[in-house]
């Protein structure tokens, strides 16, 4: 019958099957001395928390660099609305900044402006897009690290990216260095892919996979250099050398030239359209900064000691900084420890090549006199990757030492601990990551609570003035607070920015003379590359309708007592009168009583209700 026939067929298949080897059996539990399959989280689990943190950064992070406002948000506003402030770097005489970089963001901003009525909402939409892009690339790098190094290292990298105060504001900044950071995330993910061929090495499909991965890495580095920050070539030098070794010089040059041609041609076309002549901004920027050693160029805007970046990284990376500095030694020590079941073998040499660009970047910029926090943005992912690998190797080395010095305790840990590891060896790294996250939260809280007033007051006044019955001209002025002006995205229709003298004696931006491209091609005769003052950039305080100012204790005759009407006022940290530790971190119920605050105020010649409705 049918049942007997099926049973006979099953017996024949069972007899023909090869005997099952121990390796083919189901994995035993850790109590039997075998480790379970290493945990490697999926991208879908890594991405949502990163998206949430990046979106919060887009909505709450203050603009910490006036370069971001004047050199990028203002020209972006100009491309969208035909009005904005122009810096000397955008003069056709100098051509240091690329309109191609802005055009990428303007395409999305135009789409957002067709849906969103408020310019502030368009500003936030662009920031949200930047943050979401960064979150996706960060999640991909963390997932790839799980496969390239270990699940432990990948999860540690994800936790550091998620909690880092430096990544929190770098990811949403409209800066070429932030764009270069995104390109580094994409390039290093592809570089790791080149070490993980899907097929056995030497087979044609595997070779094609490796070449494709290197090609993607080269493309993203070229994009970061040509469209973002040309100095990225320093950080990417180890990648280039490794690609030459892996691909051969001919194939490397062919891929580099192809990537350069695909990117340089449209970039040159966009810049040529707006400048009215052939311009290579990346080359002009390199040539301008070559004179830094002689006290010119970027040195005109300030110099800092060699340890400036180490102090800065203490704030933005906190506990990840010592791990970053110890990573080379820990990677070397980890070579002596065998890998866990299912994990790739230790590759300290390969890891050193992968991470060396970050150390090279830190050394290069520490040697340059002019230093700014944003210069480190491209290396943040590599710094955190080094810290994550160091933490993973430290745990492996500690486990090996425990097994050698206390074998019975190590055996009990393998039998009862998570993933076959003695619990304290998991608890210490987890506690370090938690402490780092708390310190980063304190830093983020300080940025928002202590320095968030400018965006807050400008947003509120912009929303209020947008309801005016007419769009009559309105001059919004800044004095000593010119460098915290967040951009024309925060001014309502009919309002224009202006500056009055209040102690600054450098060169300020001036309005574009006409809508694009005529205004971007025009030459302001007073623009110079020596930061020399120009009286034409200032207006008289008497001609101001609205003034935004920081009213510090001791200021003579505050305007709020001299006929000016307060429209908005928010607390702003008085850094000179506050302790250094409490102004660096926000600790609830502790730092508020120790810090000193000033009033960040918006003042009008008329009461706000009169300005809006014509009567009180």
Image (cartoon, helix red, strand yellow):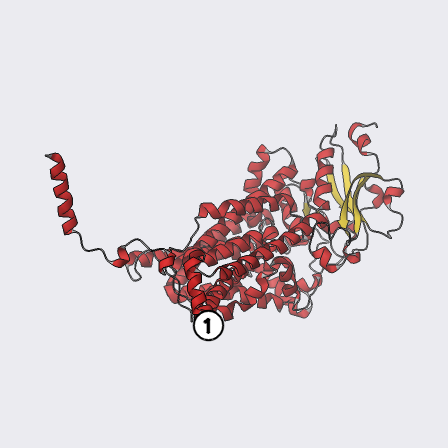
- Residue 602 horizontal side relative to residue 448, left or right: right
The residue pinned by badge 1 equals 405
Q: Is residue 208 left or right of residue 112?
A: left
At horizontal 41% and vertical 66% (from top left) the residue drawn is 346
Residue 179 horizontal/vertical position (percent): 55, 52
Q: Is residue 172 above or below residue 245?
A: above
Q: Residue at x 14, y 36 (%)?
A: 3
Q: Nearer the viewer, residue 605 or 266?
A: 605
Q: Quadrant of the C terminus?
A: top right
- Location of residue 19 in the rendering, given as x and y in whole percent from the top left corner: 19, 56
- What number of labels is visible? 1
Q: Position of residue 510 (x, y in %)?
A: 72, 48
Nearer-the-camera pick, 384 or 153:
153
Crowd rating for badge 1 (residues with CA inside 10 Å; few <14, some 14–19, many 20+):
few
- In what element is the residue under mark 1? helix
Q: Please tell me whether residue 394 is drawn above or below residue 261 in the rendered image.
A: below
Q: Residue at x 12, y 35 (%)?
A: 2
Q: Quadrant of residue 194?
A: bottom left
In the picture, measured across the screen, residue 413 lies left or right of residue 80, that is left
From this viewpoint, is residue 257 visible? no
Residue 261 appears in the rendering: yes
Quadrant of the rendered structure where residue 547 is? Answer: top right
- Give the position of the N terminus as an image quadrant: top left
Point out residue 219 in the picture as x, y percentages from the top left corner.
Answer: 45, 55
Observer-nearest residue: 137 or 260?
137
């Amino acid at each position: 019958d049918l049942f007997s026939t099926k049973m006979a067929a099953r017996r024949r298949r069972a007899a023909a099957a090869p005997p099952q080897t121990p390796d083919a059996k189901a994995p035993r539990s850790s109590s039997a001395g075998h480790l379970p399959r290493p945990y490697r989280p999926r991208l879908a689990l890594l991405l949502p928390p990163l998206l949430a943190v990046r979106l919060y950064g887009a909505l709450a992070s203050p603009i910490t660099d006036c370069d971001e406002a004047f050199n990028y948000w203002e020209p972006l506003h100009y491309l969208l609305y035909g009005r904005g402030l122009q810096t000397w770097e955008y003069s056709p005489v100098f051509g240091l900044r690329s309109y191609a970089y802005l055009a990428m963001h303007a395409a999305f901003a135009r789409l957002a402006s067709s849906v969103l009525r408020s310019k502030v909402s368009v500003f936030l939409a662009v920031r949200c897009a930047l943050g979401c892009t960064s979150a996706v690339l960060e999640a991909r790098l963390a997932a790839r690290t799980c496969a390239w190094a270990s699940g432990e290292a990948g999860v540690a990298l994800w936790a550091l990216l998620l909690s880092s105060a430096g990544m929190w504001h770098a990811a949403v900044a409209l800066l070429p260095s932030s764009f270069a950071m995104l390109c580094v995330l994409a390039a290093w993910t592809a570089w790791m892919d080149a070490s993980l061929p899907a097929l056995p090495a030497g087979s044609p499909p595997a070779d094609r996979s490796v070449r494709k991965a290197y090609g993607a890495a080269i493309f993203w580095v070229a994009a970061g250099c040509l469209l973002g920050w040309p100095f990225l070539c320093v950080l990417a030098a180890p990648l280039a050398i490794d690609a030459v070794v892996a691909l051969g010089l001919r194939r490397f040059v062919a891929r580099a030239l192809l990537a350069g041609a695909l990117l340089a041609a449209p970039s040159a076309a966009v810049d040529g359209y707006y400048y009215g002549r052939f311009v290579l901004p990346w080359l002009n920027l390199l040539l301008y900064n070559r004179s830094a050693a002689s006290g010119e160029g970027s040195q005109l805007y300030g110099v800092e000691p060699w340890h400036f970046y180490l102090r800065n990284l203490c704030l933005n990376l906190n506990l990840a900084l010592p791990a970053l500095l110890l990573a080379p030694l820990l990677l070397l020590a980890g070579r002596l420890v065998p890998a866990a079941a299912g994990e790739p073998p230790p590759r300290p040499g390969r890891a050193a090549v992968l991470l060396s660009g970050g150390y090279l970047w830190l050394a290069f910029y520490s040697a340059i006199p002019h230093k700014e926090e944003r210069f480190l943005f491209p290396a943040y992912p590599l710094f955190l990757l080094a810290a994550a690998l160091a933490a993973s190797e430290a745990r492996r080395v500690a486990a090996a030492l425990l097994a050698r010095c206390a074998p019975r305790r190590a055996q009990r840990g393998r039998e009862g601990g998570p993933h076959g590891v003695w619990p304290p060896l998991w608890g210490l790294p987890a506690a370090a990551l938690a402490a780092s996250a708390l310190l980063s939260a304190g830093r983020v809280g300080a940025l928002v609570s202590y320095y968030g007033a400018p965006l807050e007051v400008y947003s509120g006044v912009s929303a209020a003035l947008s309801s005016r019955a007419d769009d009559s001209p309105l001059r919004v002025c800044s004095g000593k607070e010119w460098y915290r002006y967040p951009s024309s995205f925060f001014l309502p229709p009919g309002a224009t920015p202006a500056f009055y003298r209040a102690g600054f004696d450098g060169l300020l931006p001036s309005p574009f003379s006409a809508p694009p491209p005529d205004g971007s091609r025009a030459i302001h005769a007073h623009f110079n590359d020596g930061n020399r003052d120009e009286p034409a950039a200032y207006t008289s305080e008497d001609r101001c309708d609205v003034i935004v100012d920081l009213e510090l204790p001791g200021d003579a005759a505050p305007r709020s007592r001299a006929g000016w009407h307060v429209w908005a006022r928010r607390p702003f940290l008085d850094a000179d009168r506050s302790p250094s530790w409490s102004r660096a971190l926000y600790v609830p119920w502790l730092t508020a009583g120790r810090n000193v605050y000033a009033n960040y105020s918006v003042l009008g010649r008329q009461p706000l209700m009169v300005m809006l409705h014509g009567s009180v």
